[in-house]
Image: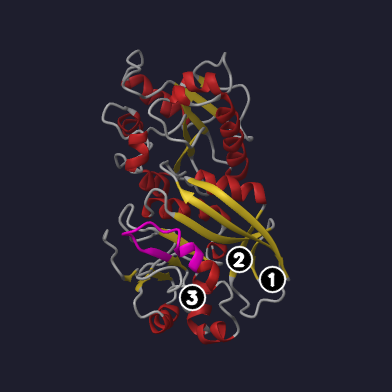
Amino acid sequence: MPTVTPGLCDDPVVDAETVRIYEEQAARYEAQRTPSLRDRAAAFGARLGAGRPPVDLGCGPGFYTDAIGSPAVALDAATAMLRRTREVAPGCLPVRADLRRLPFRRGALGGGWARNTYVHLRTVDVPGALAELHDALCVGAPLEATFFGGDREGRDLFPHDDLPGRWFSAWPRERLVDVIEGAGFGLDELDEATSRDGTVYTVRATRLRSLPDRVGPGLRLLVCGLNPSLHAADAGVGYVTPGNRFWPAALEAGLVSVDRDPRHALAHHGVGMTDLVKRATPRAAELTADEYRAGFARVERLCAWLRPAALCVVGLAGWRAAVDRRAQPGWQPAPVGGVPTYVMPSTSGLNAATPLAALVEHLRAAASPP
C-alpha cells in the first residue's frame, strides 16, 4: 500500500473560528445530526480501486468513515472530531491536517469523500485545495463532494445554522464546474438538491491524468500553457521536461525562486498556472477546435473571477490556433476576462528560434502589465 502517514499538522490554516467551534461543540454537532447518507458512502466505496485507502475529508464525528472503506484515512482540522472518529471507526488512519496542505504522497489515496467540507473554505482557496487532492489521489480515483449553491460567503450565512459563527461559501453552478475541471477532475455528475437553506450540489468526479490549476487570490501573473504533456501530468508539474526552458527563464527573470515548484511559485511569488485545455496529450496537435474554444472560455471566466494582474499565454502558435490567427508576440489588443494579456513564444526546446535570453525578456515584460 502506498505510504500514508497518520499524524498531526501543527500549522492548520483553515478558518480558526470554524475549527474552534468544532473543537468545543463536537458532541452537540453529532447529537443533532443523523448519518443519512451511509448507503451513498458505501456506493462510493465500491468505486475505489484496490490497494489505496480512501480519505474522508473533514470526517467530523466519523459518520461515514467506515462506510467508504477500511482502512480509510480520517482527516479533520479538529482534534475533538478525530477522537470521536477513532471511537466509531477504530480501524481508521487519523490525520489532523488542512485541506490546503494535505500531508500525503503523490497518488497515495484511492478516493476522496467530502461531505460539507470544502464549504468551510473561501471560494478563492478551493482551487488550491482541490489541486492538493488531485496530487494525493491516484489516476482514476473517484471524488464525491458537496458544495452550496449561490454567490455569497461568510459567517452566519444560513439563518437555521445551529452552530453559528462558522464560515461557509456558496457557488454559482458554472464557476463550480470550471473549478472542478480546472483542478484536473472529469465531472461525471452534478446533482442539485434543495434544502431549507438553499441549493446543495453533489459533485461526482474522477481524477484524470492531467495537471490541476495552481491559482488563488492576489495573483501577480497567471501563466497559461496550451495543454499538459503526459510527462507533466504524471509529474504534477508543468514544463517539467529537461529540454523545456520555462523554469530556467522564470528563474532568471525573477518570477520564481525555486525550480519546477508550482506550489512555491503560487504561495511565495503570486505566480499561478493554468492551461487552455486540461486534457493531457503527447502532442498539442491532437487537440480539437471545440476543445480550444471551450478552454479559452474557461480561462476567460477564471480571469474575470480571480482578476490576476496579468495573463501570460506561453505558446504563440497555440494562441494563434486557439484564439487569434494573426496574433503577434507581446501585449494583445483585447484583454481576457478584463485582464491584460501577453502572448509569448513557446518555451519548448523544439523552438530553437527563440533563445533563452528572449524568453526571459518576454516573462519580465508579462510581469509588468501596462
Instruction: Measure the alpha-carbon separation of dots 1 and 2.
Output: 9 Å
- Measure the alpha-carbon separation of dots 3 and 2: 16 Å
Could you say where residue 229 lies in the image, as x and y percent from the top left?
38, 32
Mark positioned earlier in the residue sequence (1 or 2): 1
The residue labelled by disc 2 is 168
Above or below for 45 versus 284: below
Q: Nearer the viewer, residue 154 or 362?
A: 154
- Which quarter of the picture shows residue 253? top left
What amino acid is found at the position of numbered circle 1 in the picture?
Answer: Phe
Dots 1 and 2: beta carbons under 8 Å? yes
Query: Percent position (x, y) of residue 147?
Result: 60, 60
Q: Is residue 370 visible?
A: no
Query: What residue does disc 1 label?
Result: 158
Residue beneath the point at 34% across and 77% down: 91
The answer to whether residue 244 is visible is: yes
Magenta stretch: give its range: 42-55
233 up-or-down from 242: above or below: below
- Residue 352 sits in quarter: top left
Picture quarter containing residue 49?
A: bottom left
State the SS at label 2: strand
Q: What residue is pinned by disc 3?
A: 60
Q: Is residue 315 magenta?
A: no
Kindly state the secondary structure of the residue where label 3 is placed. loop
Residue drawn 49% across the image and 18% down it: 329
Identify the residue at horizontal 39%, vertical 67% (top origin): 97
Quadrant of the rendering where the N terminus is positioned: bottom left
Q: Amino acid at mark 3?
A: Gly
Q: Earlier in the sequence, mark 3 or mark 1?
A: 3
